[in-house]
Structures are given as C-alpha cells and as structure tokens.
Amino acid sequence: MGEIFLATDELLGRRVAVKLLADRYARDEGIRQRFTREAHAAARLSGESGAVTIFDVGEWNERPYIVMEHLPGGSLEDRLRRSGAQAPAQALPWLEQAAAALDAAHRQGIVHRDIKPANLLLDARGDVHVADFGIASATGLDSLTLTGTVLGTAGYLSPEQAQGERAGPASDRYALAIVAYELLSGERPFASESVTAEASAHANAPVPSIAARCKNLPWEVDPVFQRALAKDPSARYGTAAEFIASLRDALSQAAGNTGRMGVTIAPARPRRSEGRRLAIPAALLLAAAAAGAVAAVLLTGGGNTAAERVVTRRVTGPAGGVTTVHETVTRQQTVTAPAQAPPPPPAPPSGGSDGHSLNDRGYQLIQQGDFAGAIPLLQQAVQSLSDAGPADPYEGYANYNLGYALYRSGRCSEAVPYLRLAERLEPDRSEPKDIRKRAQHC
C-alpha cells in the first residue's frame, strides 16, 4: 500500500521512518482517505505502551505521508523466518506488550483489523510495538469498507472477517491468538497453500491441538487456545491481556504441578487373585485443564476374568451446562490424559529383576521425571517380557513406558518402534498412538 523510507529528522537529530502512500494508490481518493485515517488512528495511540509513535502527517507531491519512530529490531515475522518457534519465555513478553497496545486501542474505539507478525515490530531493546493501522476502523469515522468486503491477511483472519462481516475488538484478539499459536509452535493453526482454504478453515475448522504439535508444550494450553480462537466472538476472552494471562497461567501451572506434560496419575494399590497380578488400576482421578472434564473411574471384577469398570463423566460445557455420561468398559482399557505414561500395573514386591518389577521400577523413575534413568530398566523389562513367551499384559505397558521415556529424552526416532509395538499389544488404548505421532513429528 505504501513505501517505507529511513530518514533523519534534521531538526531533532533522530532517525525516523517515513511511510509514503504509493503513487498508484494516491490517485484513488478513497485510499487516500484510508491512509490519512491510519495516521489519525495511530496518532491517537502515540504515548500508549506498545504503540508506534507518530511524529508528523502531511503530503508531498499530492502523496500523503506519515513520519513515525524508527524501530530497528525488525518484526516478529523476521524472527519466525530466521529461527521458527520461540520459547515461551521469549514469546510471552512480546505477546503481553502487543496485548497492552491492542487493549489501549480498543478503549479508544480503534480496531486494527490486520494483526500479524509483520505488523509487530521490535525496538532496539527487543520490545514489541504494534504498527500499521492501515485498515483500522475508528469510532466516529465513516467506514470506507462495505460489509462483505474482506480486509486483512488470510492467515490471521477471524471467522467473522473471513465471512465478510465487520471486525471488532474480538477480531483483533483472535488474530493475536493466531500470532501466539505461531510463535509457540512455528506454524499457523490453519496454515494452507490456498488462501481461500485457510480463510475458510478459520470459519469452519476445529482448532487443532497445539500441544499435539509441540512436545515442549503441556496439554493445559489447549483449552486456552480453544477459547481464544472460538468461532463466536462473544465466547473469546474479554481483553487481549486476559488471554495472555491465561496462557501464562496454564504454562506455569503445568510446570509447577507436574514438572512435565500431562496429568499425574497415582500408582494403583496391589490387587491380587490366585497369585496372579492384574494389570488394571484400582481407581484413578483425572484432573482436566480449565474447561475440561472430571472423570471418576471405578473398577469391578477380579480373578482371571476380564475386569469391568463403570466410567462416570461429568462434562461442563462452555455455557456452564453439565452432562453426565455413563460407560461400561471391559478388560484393561484406561482413561488417561494424553502424553502421560499409562497407569502402572499393581506394584510387585520390590527388588525383583523380572520384567514386571523392571517395568514398575522404570515407571517410578518416569513419575519422578528421571527419563534417562528409566530407559535401561525399561529396555531390560521389554526384553524380559518378550522372551517370556505367552502374551503378558505388562508387555504393552513396558513398550509404551520405554517409548515414552525415549520421547521425553529427545530420542524420538528410537521411541517410534516401541510405541508402534505398544499400539499392537494394546489396540484399545489411545496413548501409544498419540505419543508415536508426536515422536514422529519432533
């Protein structure tokens, strides 16, 4: 839409950026008005934290221009192109700064409508400033865009923008959530080679799990993005700062509560019948993230027959309604959180060297976060159980535990064969497949 020049303010002796409307657009009166409105909207935010400061507005050879502060650090788009996904410790401060600028704009009735990494510029200290209110909509000014016209960048369009509806503050917050997703994962949630397909996905496709794409992110962040990227604008966070605070809180809680991804599941107490150990936990409690579900699992059965359990789930929906679901599950099917080692079989007497004992000792180390220490024990357990002959329920657990420990140790390619075998041995369980996909991705 315009050209950017680096210049020197000779009066004050400072470097500035001059944005000059391109000549081919300057002949269009409507575009000239929009460009001038950008200057006025941005100038109203000068002095606000995280907003680009405007120094002057004018015309040169009938071409409007804006003089603004020079930000030498490049953009977040540059950072993504150079190094891909950013660590949460780096991304969160940037997002907080952008959120503060957007909330300030919204309080003044200004909607940006084109939030994307290219418009988030870095100063010499590495702080983010929101730039380019080129298609901003300011309260009190007539819109130059008719309803049904789509403005913005396809990768960051809110569902309402993609459908040609007028953008509002919630649209900016949606775009910021897309930026956050991209900063943390290195890719947009609905990335596509087709602009049309990507815009359509914003309006129709479910939000893909970011935790499933990134082994360094806990599952607790998924509900945050589900809300931030809700199709209905009224279901999103009320402010940009609230979204970033929820994201930071989810990351902090996951790190503080577990020290690793997933939900901690307490080992089951021993339960025996006729001298044979059952590979079924006595009870387990799943604590789900913010808008998740609480599941109480009760087991019945015993002896050498397949056990049954009744699963009662109370699911709280976004509107606050509660639905109770009852299921009867047979054999050793378990309800667990994704990316979590499976509930262990009942603990045998300690100190043994058979496959059962080796697996349980390896699992205990996994629970303590000692994945490297668990690997040799679990390798021995897998070998011992494989050599034992008849299928043993522990073999599936041991292969999954070993694959999980290798994956968490960063040895992803080594983890895949064990996870595949665990899938075959425990076809009713979803965890081996989930972790195998993540291992293949990393």
Image: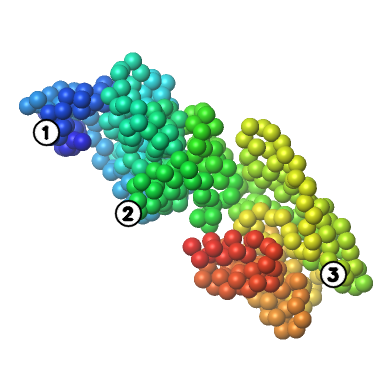
Q: Residue 277 has which mark?
A: 3
Nearer the observer, 325 or 183: 325
Nearer the observer, 441 or 104: 441
* Circle 1 crowding by C-alpha within 10 Å: few under 14, some 14–19, many from 20: some
Q: Amino acid at mark 2?
A: Arg
Q: What is the C-alpha distance between the residues marked 2 and 3?
A: 54 Å
Q: Amino acid at mark 3?
A: Arg
Note whether residue 375 is visible. Answer: no
Quadrant of res 56: top left
Q: Which of marks 3 and 1 precedes in the sequence?
A: 1
> Residue 428: percent from the left, percent from the top?
69, 64
Q: Which-is-in-front pick, marks 1 and 3?
A: 1
- From what the image shows, is residue 254 above or below residue 151? below
Q: Which-is-in-front pick, marks 2 and 1?
A: 1
Q: Which of marks 3 and 2 precedes in the sequence?
A: 2
- From what the image shows, is residue 227 above or below residue 298? above
Q: Residue 210 has which mark?
A: none
Label 2: which residue?
82
Label 1: which residue?
23
* Circle 3 crowding by C-alpha within 10 Å: few under 14, some 14–19, many from 20: many
Q: Which of marks 1 and 2 precedes in the sequence?
A: 1
